Image (cartoon, grey):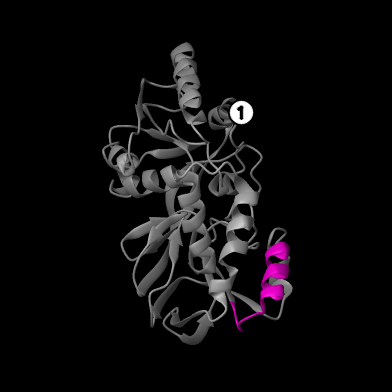
Amino acid sequence: MPTPRLGRTLVIANPASHSGKGAAAADFVERFLNSFESATEGYTIQRTTAMGDARIMAAAARKFQTVIALGGDGVIHEVVNGLMDIPIQDRPTLGIIPMGTGNDYARTLGLARNAPEAALGQIMQGPVRKIDLGKVNNEYFMQTLSFGIDAAVAHDTTARRNQGDNQEGTALFISSSLKLLSKAHEGWHMIATVDDEKTLDLQEIFFAINIGPTYGAGFKVCPAAVPNDGLLDVCYNVRIPTVPTILRLLGMMRAGLHTTSRVIKTMRAKKLHIEFTEDVPVQTDGEELEGRIFDVEVLPDELRVITSPSCTW
């Protein structure tokens, strides 16, 4: 008799994700696992009802071999942080069924987005790979951490979705960016120490630190980022651009071409110490953070994740 692919499995599902389509996706997964008993050694499905539920559920998942997160990047972020409460030798493998607006972690893993049947098929066939995580202060991030106007955009898009805005994906990201551009003309002053060696004194409109290449529903902010290279990819401005230049860079960012601009610089690092002289918008995987002082580091090979069979990194 073949060994079940997933072992004991916990599905953590956000029914409200993707404008409520997460509920039908969770029902589909439940029907599938009921019908194909050989896929697991038994499963439990838990549906979230409030922010923070997924983190609590994942933190209590020590007895499972696989945890499947069904929802958007926010729920995946919670699940990852919950899993990090479990010692690495007992930590379950993570699977993703992406049902969200941005789905940038799914892009990194090569998974089908907002297509639960296809994503579940990939989970049943794809390889398990070790992947890096980022850590900022006491919070983990699987995809992105950023400061400045793009973080303000992330906060605005979340608020608009919560208020019932029907825009999604790239359109939502761009419309929020246009609304908030006028607030970025001065930037935020910061001092960054990189790998305990180099100190940067910067006036930033945006400073992005990534594990995977994209955020904002596919914008290639750090196009060269590889999620298992043991390094953080950093993209930031070296001078304050004019509003027309910002608009041009935003368009170029979709294809990752903004890094060719003299306004933009990139680097790689294992850790950074960052201090702002004033409050600054901060987001990690789309979730809001607060503060002025941030210690950031990469944690190589920290999580076992099921990727698409066609994933190329």
**Residue 247: quadrant of the picture:** bottom right
The answer to whether residue 210 is seen in the rendering is no
Q: Residue furthest top?
A: 35
SS of the residue at dot 1?
A: helix
**Residue 45: quadrant of the picture:** top left
Q: Residues within 10 Å of mark 1 (few under 14, many from 20)?
A: some
Q: Pick whichever, 214 or 49, lies toward us.
A: 49
Q: Is residue 209 above or below residue 8?
A: below
Q: How many marks?
A: 1
What is the magenta segment's predominant secondary structure? helix
Amino acid identity at mark 1? Ala
Q: Pick whichever, 236 or 242, lies toward us.
A: 242
Residue at x 33% of width, y 32% of height: 64
In the rendered structure, does residue 225 fall within the stretch colored magenta? no
**Residue 275: quadrant of the picture:** bottom left
The answer to whether residue 32 is seen in the rendering is yes
> Residue 85, position in %: x, y?
28, 48
Q: Is residue 26 above or below residue 113?
A: above
Q: Is residue 256 toward the left or the right of residue 139 in the image?
A: right
Q: Is residue 52 above or below residue 7?
A: below
Residue at x 39% of width, y 62% of height: 135
Q: Is residue 234 toward the left or the right of residue 191 in the image?
A: right
> Residue 183, position in %: x, y?
53, 73
> Residue 309, position in %: x, y?
62, 37
Q: Pick whichever, 90 or 195, lies toward us.
A: 195
Give the magenta part as a residue range.
237-252
Residue at x 45% of width, y 61% of height: 283
Identify the residue position indicated by label 1 in the image: 118
Q: Is residue 200 toward the left or the right of residue 310 in the image?
A: left
> Residue 77, position in %: x, y?
42, 48
